[in-house]
Image: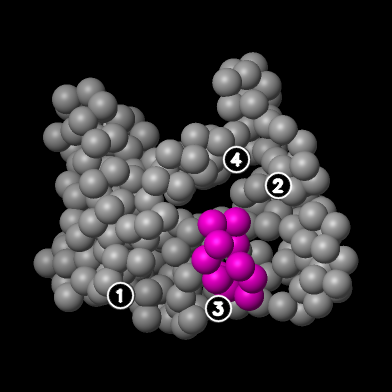
Amino acid sequence: MVSYDSWANLADQFVDEAYASVKGFVRTFVLHHHLLEHLPPPPASVLDVGGGAGHQSFPLAQAGYDVTLLDPSQAMLNKAERRLQQLPTDAQHRVKLLQADGESADEAVDGQRFAAVLCHGVLGYLENPEVLVNQLCLCAAANGLISIMTGNAKAMAVRPALERRWDDALASFDARAEVGVLGVPGRADTVDELSELLKSQGVEPLRWYGVWLFVDWLEFSGAELDPNDSKQVSMTAAVELEASRRDPYRQLSRVFHLVGRKNIS
């Protein structure tokens, strides 16, 4: 049973504005390159849980992967359907859209097991991520990849400080929750805690990365980033990708990306 579509009023803002920004491009670009470091070759099967309009998984379909995009929001799936029609015909045929909650992903996919299971930007909207993480791990095949992107609890003071909200920044050093840029309450995790949760589900963490660093600092400090300046956007993405792999930069990223592999039983 799919719950009330809480994303119906946010779909336009999320897809048409957030992903059309430089930050949106950087997120997709950086995560895509991280995934290609770990994914088996196409046409391996990929499940994108909470995949929204397909910004992360459709490029994988274009690269030859078989993609199942699962999302509880019909509004978001409508966006995905329209974006899907813009892909080459062969890529369209490699994508399946399913409406379901991530907490019931195994049932929604009829027990299918996938070479990779993605869940990006979803955990932060859940008070308790354990049920969803259990489903992600369950849907992965033996030796399958688990890819999770979520808020970095160790960098919670970055945004309010850059916005010069000093009282909020001081209170954020030990905080786990905030109202995000879309105006929706969210929660953050730590790499260590999420790694332990994956281990408890038979998944061995492989590597973690940062996702947003300099683009966050620029945006929250009031700088204008022009998404139409292709050269500038390309160089921004290249710098963000390099920073995502290195300390101390990745530790300061407001979001982190954790990749693990399911043990062979």
User: Under tag 3, what secondary structure?
Assistant: helix
Task: Determine whether, in the image, residue 177 is placed left or right of residue 116.
Answer: right
* Label 3 or label 4, whichever comes before in sequence order: 4
Q: Name the quadrant of the N terminus.
A: bottom left
Distance between the alpha carbons at the discs numbered 4 and 1: 28 Å
* Label 2 or label 1, whichever comes before in sequence order: 1
* Label 4 or label 2, whichever comes before in sequence order: 4
The residue stretch that appears in magenta: 177-189
User: Under tag 2, what secondary structure?
Assistant: helix
User: Which residue is tagged 3?
Assistant: 196
Disc 3 marks a residue whose amino acid type is: Glu
Distance between the alpha carbons at the discs numbered 3 and 2: 28 Å
Task: Determine whether, in the image, residue 172 is placed left or right of residue 48.
Answer: right
* Label 4 or label 1, whichever comes before in sequence order: 4
Asked which quadrant contains residue 144, the reply is bottom left
Residue at 37 percent of width and 81 percent of height:
131
* Label 3 or label 2, whichever comes before in sequence order: 3
User: Under tag 4, what secondary structure?
Assistant: helix
Q: Residue 265's x, y, as percent?
A: 31, 73
Residue at 55 percent of width and 70 percent of height:
186
Q: Residue 104's x, y, as percent?
A: 24, 74
**Quick check: 160 above or below 103?**
above
Residue 188 among magenta residues? yes
User: Which residue is tagged 4?
Assistant: 23
Are the residues at dot 4 and dot 2 in contact (C-beta closer than 8 Å)?
Answer: yes
Disc 4 marks a residue whose amino acid type is: Lys
Distance between the alpha carbons at the discs numbered 3 and 1: 19 Å
Residue at 85 percent of width and 57 percent of height:
164
Please name which of the two marks, 4 or 1, marks the residue nearer to the observer: 4
Q: Residues within 10 Å of mark 4 (few under 14, many from 20)?
A: many
Disc 2 marks a residue whose amino acid type is: Asp
Q: Residues within 10 Å of mark 2 (few under 14, many from 20)?
A: some
